[in-house]
């Protein structure tokens, strides 16, 4: 079974007049003579030329869209248009039949909504083949980036007793009989009898545990699944998604922003180098899709231009306070074109504001810093003005925020005071506070939502299309 050559390798080799064996799935079969075979290594099909006059008619009938084949033959220069080489088949074996009457993926255009319903088969389409090859490359690039810089890959827990942000939108983990859980004398659920002896949930972030690692190993990163029980049915939200969360000892806010900018440029460049064909295909797909939209709703930049835009520009850095002034004086705000008008300082920025700064005002990616402490998390370092924290968000064209991070509050008294102000129980996070008691130091970190990154690099419009099996309200299929 291992004697096969992958189609991508054959097409890139430049060789002809050699004997080969290829295996893959039939995309189309024309005129009882030409098979378009694809094995998932590339979006490009390999044309198999069948000597139909000397082939068993019963075998020919079984060569249908979706069938798995093993083909041996001679690789020759193609006489036809659209491909450089063909394989003249000398032997064809059907490895798996596909009933053409029932196979859902026929050689025609299918809607993305339909393909989500058959997510177990959508990998076989050009669009999803390209997306998941790009996703694979980005994943590898992230590990490569951090490993080259001496970071330690830390596995933080999936099951935890903290919810990191204090947001409360968590999935609970229990082995109780839900119809009859044990109760305390006061009638509340008695979690002391649960598997872990306390209430637990699926993690919303590995950050707090990541900080513990950074306080000994200096530079760590996490890359794992996270979960949010938000009842949100948008194109930007999932209940299960992957996060990259580096934490670095002896870093301040500027160091943090420098690293995040370097990471984003590195992985985008890596994907453009390794998956050029896939990204060009996805760019063309997006152009075709945009032709259906009114002119004012179309993107100013195509996908390849958008990616180059991020590589070629130094990210603009400004404070939240400066951004608010720009937005307040902007034409869309004055003409009441923003859905959420900017009244003044303290407003939480929406995606439309973030995109205005990137796409219209600066025309480059933006790093916003020093947000009001009221709209940010308890662990962010408080600035000397008493109003803002050393937070940063990185804003990208077409997507808004792609990275969120901060310098962490290393001063025990300030951290405890902030936790008291917003009602986070200190006794539950005693272990987190210990890192401030014993050898605390300035440190920083950020979170990058992996699916947001894949969404940006592939140009897709819905986050459910860049994760193999999306989890969202009322859906846990496959």
Image: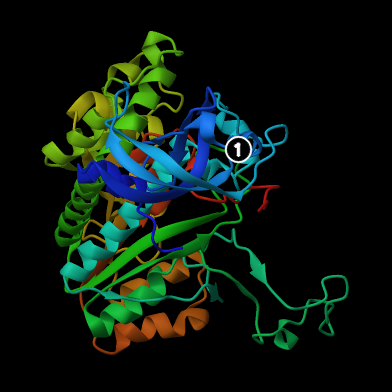
x, y percent for residue 219: 23, 74
Q: Is residue 306 above or below residue 419?
A: above
Is residue 397 at all visible to an observer of this figure?
no
x, y percent for residue 386: 27, 58
Residue in front for this viewpoint, 431 or 141: 141
Q: Quadrant of residue 395?
A: top left
Q: Quadrant of residue 282?
A: top left
Q: Residue at x 23, y 64 (%)?
A: 144
Q: Residue at x 47, y 79 (%)?
A: 429
Q: Is residue 225 left or right of residue 406?
A: right
Q: Quadrant of residue 313?
A: top left
Q: Is residue 175 left or right of residue 343?
A: right
| Circle 1 residue | 56
x, y percent for residue 350: 41, 36
Q: Is residue 421 left or right of residue 227?
A: left
Q: Residue at x 25, y 31 (%)?
A: 304
Residue in front for this viewpoint, 24 or 365: 24
Q: Is residue 421 left or right of residue 325?
A: right
Q: Which element carries disc 1, helix, strand or loop? A: loop
x, y percent for residue 82: 32, 24
Q: Residue at x 40, y 64 (%)?
A: 378
Residue in front for this viewpoint, 382 or 477: 477
Q: Residue furthest bottom?
A: 438
Is residue 377 at all visible to an observer of this figure?
yes
Dot 1, how many residues are within 10 Å of its Cα: few (below 14), some (14-19), or many (20+)? few
Q: Is residue 340 above or below residue 440?
A: above
Question: How many labels sit on residues?
Answer: 1
Q: Residue furthest front?
A: 54
Q: Is residue 86 above or below residue 331?
A: below
Give the colour scheme shown: rainbow
Q: Residue furthest right?
A: 180
């Amino acid at each position: 079974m291992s004697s096969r050559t992958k189609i991508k390798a054959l097409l890139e080799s430049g060789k002809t007049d050699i004997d080969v064996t290829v295996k893959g799935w039939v995309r189309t079969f024309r005129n009882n003579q030409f098979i378009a075979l694809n094995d998932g290594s590339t979006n490009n099909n390999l044309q198999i030329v069948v000597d139909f006059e000397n082939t068993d008619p019963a075998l020919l009938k079984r060569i249908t869209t979706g069938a798995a084949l093993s083909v041996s033959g001679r690789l020759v220069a193609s006489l036809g248009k659209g491909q450089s080489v063909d394989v003249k088949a000398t032997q064809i074996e059907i490895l798996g039949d596909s009933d053409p009457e029932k196979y859902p993926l026929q050689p025609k255009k299918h809607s993305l909504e339909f393909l989500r319903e058959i997510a177990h088969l959508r990998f076989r389409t050009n669009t999803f083949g390209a997306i998941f090859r790009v996703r694979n490359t980005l994943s590898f690039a992230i590990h490569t980036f951090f490993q080259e810089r001496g970071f330690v890959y830390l596995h933080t827990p999936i099951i935890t007793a903290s919810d990191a942000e204090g947001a409360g939108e968590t999935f609970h983990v229990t082995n109780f009989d839900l119809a009859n859980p044990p109760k305390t004398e006061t009638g509340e659920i008695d979690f002391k009898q649960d598997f872990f002896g306390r209430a637990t949930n699926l993690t919303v972030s590995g950050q707090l545990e990541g900080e513990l690692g950074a306080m000994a190993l200096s530079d760590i990163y996490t890359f794992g699944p996270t979960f949010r029980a938000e009842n949100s049915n948008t194109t930007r939200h999932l209940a299960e998604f992957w996060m990259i969360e580096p934490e670095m000892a002896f870093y301040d806010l500027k160091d943090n922003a420098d690293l995040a900018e370097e990471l984003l440029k590195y992985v985008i460049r890596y994907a453009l180098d390794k998956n050029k064909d896939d990204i060009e295909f996805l760019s063309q797909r997006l152009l075709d899709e945009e032709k259906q939209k009114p002119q004012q709703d179309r993107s100013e930049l195509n996908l390849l231009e958008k990616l180059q835009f991020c590589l070629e520009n130094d990210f603009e850095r400004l404070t939240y306070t400066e951004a608010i002034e720009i937005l307040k004086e902007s034409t869309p705000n004055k003409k009441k074109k923003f859905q959420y008008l900017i009244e003044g300082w303290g407003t939480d920025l929406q995606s439309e504001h973030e995109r205005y700064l990137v796409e219209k005002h600066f025309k480059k990616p933006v790093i916003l810093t020093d947000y009001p402490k009221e709209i940010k998390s308890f662990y962010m370092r408080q600035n000397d003005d008493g109003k803002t924290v050393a937070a940063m968000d990185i804003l990208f064209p077409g997507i808004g925020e792609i990275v969120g991070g901060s310098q962490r509050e290393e001063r025990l008294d300030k951290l405890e005071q902030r936790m008291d102000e917003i009602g986070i129980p200190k006794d539950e996070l005693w272990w987190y506070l210990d890192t401030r008691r014993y050898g605390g130091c300035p440190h920083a970190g950020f979170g990058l939502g992996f699916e947001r990154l894949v969404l940006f690099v592939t140009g897709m419009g819905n986050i459910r299309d860049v994760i193999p099996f999306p989890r969202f309200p009322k859906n846990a299929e496959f």
